[in-house]
Image (cartoon, coloured by chain):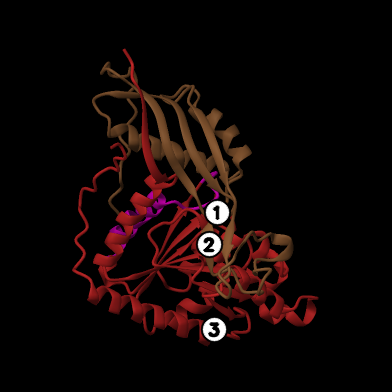
Chain colours: A brown, B red
Amino acid sequence: MHEVDMTRALVLSMQSWREGHRPQQPKVSRVNLQVGAFTCVEPEQLLFTWKVAIANSWLEGAQLAIEPVPLLGRCLACASTYTPAAEQGYRSPCCSHPMEEIVCGRELRIRSVDYELVEANPPPNPQPLNPVFCP
Amino acid sequence: MHMPLEDNLGLNLLAANQHQAAHNREHFDAWQLLCINVMSSPGAGKTSLLERSLPLLATDFAMAVLEGDMTTQLDAERLEAVGVPVVPITTGRSCHLDAAMVAGGLRLLRQRLDPASLDLLWVENVGNLVCPAEFEVGEHRKVALLSVTEGDDKPLKYPVMFREADCVLITKTDLLPYLPVQVERIEDHIKQVNPHCAVLRVSASSGAGIEAWHLWLHQQVAAQRSALLAMPAPQPSSAAAPLSLAR
């Protein structure tokens, strides 16, 4: 269940985004994600862990919308694009060239956030600012 | 009256982790060391490789190890025995090291030594072929290990790890005579997903291939030193600004 850690990382990134709106409070209705096929993330699992992670938090009720992005490689021998599949290996079917260029499929991207700004009534339990640890 | 708004971020889901990783790297560059993140599945031989390599490399490099382990400090004790400073980082339930954990480990390391005296900093990640591939910690190079006992299909099953690696070490090659596995097939599968990484065969128990692996390391240290000379002296901010993503 590495999606638990991915979700935690996503929530941290969302907190950083929220800090930029101070002193106002964004009330998030939807987070629009792009998740590539060539990542370590299973969208179904992410949807599940998201619901668990945001319960009783400032993100409670926010929907997670995941747009899957297929893996596309480009064959550097003939410039055509192809969809590799583990069963056939990652070489291009046209020229049997290794997968040098990935056109898309590595996305783990917060594409956009839908929200409303709530006028500054400071939240009862302010979340701590996302610290950056100086090593 | 609430206005519906949309922020187009186009930002990585891991932006907060990447921000911390970039800050770690600023420090590594200021200390003029090369940081290597060592990753593999559990039992592929990360600790055994370091046990073999560190005493030999110690004649050329000053080194330290940040040792990620889920619950125990057993690996840290093994490495401390070879005479290199080791800081254990217990990750608890987390199956990988993230950039903040490594920053915490660096703080502990600084209580023992001045990192600017180091040439090489090793980060031995938690045994896992999935998460560590996506969570950068500020490293300059990623090294992935794959033991011959794991079978030749792992690069195809966990392609992201092998795509991300700068060097893949095929370990435990001394066992090849006893296994129905062709090392050429393993190499081919790695090259399919990552044609540009270095792929080396090593055995920590027999020592085969260790020289070539150390040659690769020397090349990376030299390349990093040239890269640092070419860029302006890094000045890490002592109080790092938190990441702010709003527009």
In whole angstroms, how far apart are the C-alphas of marks 3 and 2? 32 Å
Choose top left, top right, bottom left or bottom right for residue B174: bottom right
- Residue ID for mark 1: A105
Q: Amino acid at mark 1?
A: Gly
Is residue A119 depicted above or below A11 in this figure?
above
Mark identifier at residue B210: 3
Amino acid type indicated by mark 2:
Ile
Mark 2 lies on a secondary structure that is strand
The residue carrying pointer 2 sits among few (fewer than 14), some (14 to 19) or many (20 or more) residues within 10 Å by Cα, namely some
Nearer the camera: disc 3 or disc 2? 2
SS at mark 1?
A: loop
The x and y percentages for residue B173 are 67, 79
Q: Which residues are magenta?
A: B92-114
Give the chain of mark 1. A
Check the picture and name the quadrant holding the N terminus of chain B: top left
Q: Nearer the viewer, mark 3 or mark 1?
A: 1
3 and 1 marks in contact (CB < 8 Å): no
State how far apart marks 2 and 1 are (Cα): 7 Å
Image coordinates for residue B145, horizontal then vertical, percent? 58, 69
Mark 3 and mark 1: Cα distance apart in space: 35 Å
Residue B227 seen by the camera: yes
Residue drawn at point x = 60 percent, y = 51 percent: A70
Q: Quadrant of residue B182?
A: bottom right
- Mark drawn on residue A102: 2
